[in-house]
Image: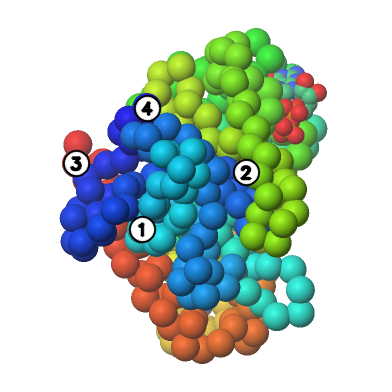
Amino acid sequence: MSILRWGWNDYFEAVWKKEERENAVPARVVAQSRGIWQVAGDFGECPADAAGKLRLAAEEGADWPAVGDWVAVELRDGGSAALIQEVLRRQSQFIRKMAGKKIAEQVMAANVDTALLVSALDGDFNPRRVERYLTQCWESGAKPVIVLNKADACERPHEKADEMQKVALGVPVCVVSAKTGLGFDAVEKFLVQGQTLVLLGSSGVGKSTIVNRLMDRTIQEVQEVRESDSRGRHTTISRQIFILPGGALLMDTPGLRELQLWDAEEGLAQTFSDIESLAAQCRFSDCNHTTEPGCAVQAAIKAGALEDWRLANWRKLQREQEFLRRKIDPEARHDERQRVKVLMRGVRQMYRDRKKG
Ligand code: GDP
Ligand code: ZN
């Protein structure tokens, strides 16, 4: 199957052409588990190992190959095995801090174009929870789409959609029922051939049910790989990227759904752009937006233009950021912020283009 089917595009073509890569071909990581990967490309699909120099350089941090990555591989044994030489520069990445004493980053999903942020319209409905996913999404470089599921179990789904739109500031909101199929034509607009999607959201909101519906009853051949990794352990991994009937790619990796915030400062500013722009109008530049005279944020709350829980939520997320910031090595943080800045510039440009178009 051609790499175009796996989402190869002009961006990666340009990255690839920048350097000489003797004996290497491009491939996409379609599954990952500990020290082994499954890669797909023009040659087909096969298990892959990381080349020694990559292992040394990456040390399982952000440079470690993740599901969705485009990599340069050297094929072995006539294409039945591969060695990953290099991870091509990502277009987007979902990162989470790794558990353990030292904070380190782990890429949960790479090169995601669109994230469907799923929330349920029944008893559990909570727009504030979506803010967190939105923040992570802006930070990753993927485009967010909010999917409100279980419309069949809700009396006034569109009132709740309006409520959601207030937190979502310009992000598309789709009202669906995975049970009845209602509203899926609106979601399908975002399933573009060659584009990669993920579903994010709390447990029980209906992500698996949505996946089943998107797959359109096609029986997904689940290819399992049994391989011994570098330490001789035997592991089984299944493919974590699926090709939907229309050609869009759906990524489903373990753990991605329980993302935690990483250094998402830029994303935070985007999600709360209304508060950020109010705060810029406060009389004092170091205003805490509590009792200071000339506070534009408090004025907006009094005037009913801003809801106070949004300010509270903004503060809470900022405190989390503050906590992480103190723990992160300043130099690494600088690099990461530069990277995010560049990414966000791209995202903003995309949204401007979209408005124009
Ligand atoms: P996940 O944890 O996000 O993957 O959620 P599941 O897909 O497992 O769904 C959780 C529960 O919600 C299951 O009992 C589903 O049958 C139910 N569910 C999913 N979608 C809908 C829907 O559109 N309407 C209703 N009423 N129930 C749904
Ligand atoms: Zn203020």
210 left or right of 170?
Answer: right
Q: Does the residue labelled 3 lie within 8 Å of ligand 2?
A: no
Instruction: Quote the CA–CA distance across marks 1 and 3.
Output: 31 Å
Q: Nearer the viewer, mark 2 or mark 3?
A: 2
- Reading the image, the residue beneath label 4 is 1
161 left or right of 188?
Answer: right
Instruction: Quote the CA–CA distance across marks 4 and 1.
Output: 20 Å
Residue at horizontal 27 percent and vertical 42 percent from the top: 9
- Reading the image, the residue beneath label 1 is 88
Q: Which of marks 4 and 1 is in front?
A: 4
Residue at horizontal 64 percent and vertical 60 percent from the top: 230
Q: Do the residues labelled 4 and 1 touch (CB within 8 Å)?
A: no
Q: Earlier in the sequence, mark 4 or mark 1?
A: 4
Q: Nearer the viewer, mark 4 or mark 3?
A: 4
Q: Earlier in the sequence, mark 2 or mark 4?
A: 4
- Ligand 1 found in image quarter: top right
- Reading the image, the residue beneath label 2 is 253
Residue 205 is situated, as x and y percent measured from the top left of the image, at 72, 33
Q: Name the residue furthest front.
A: 77
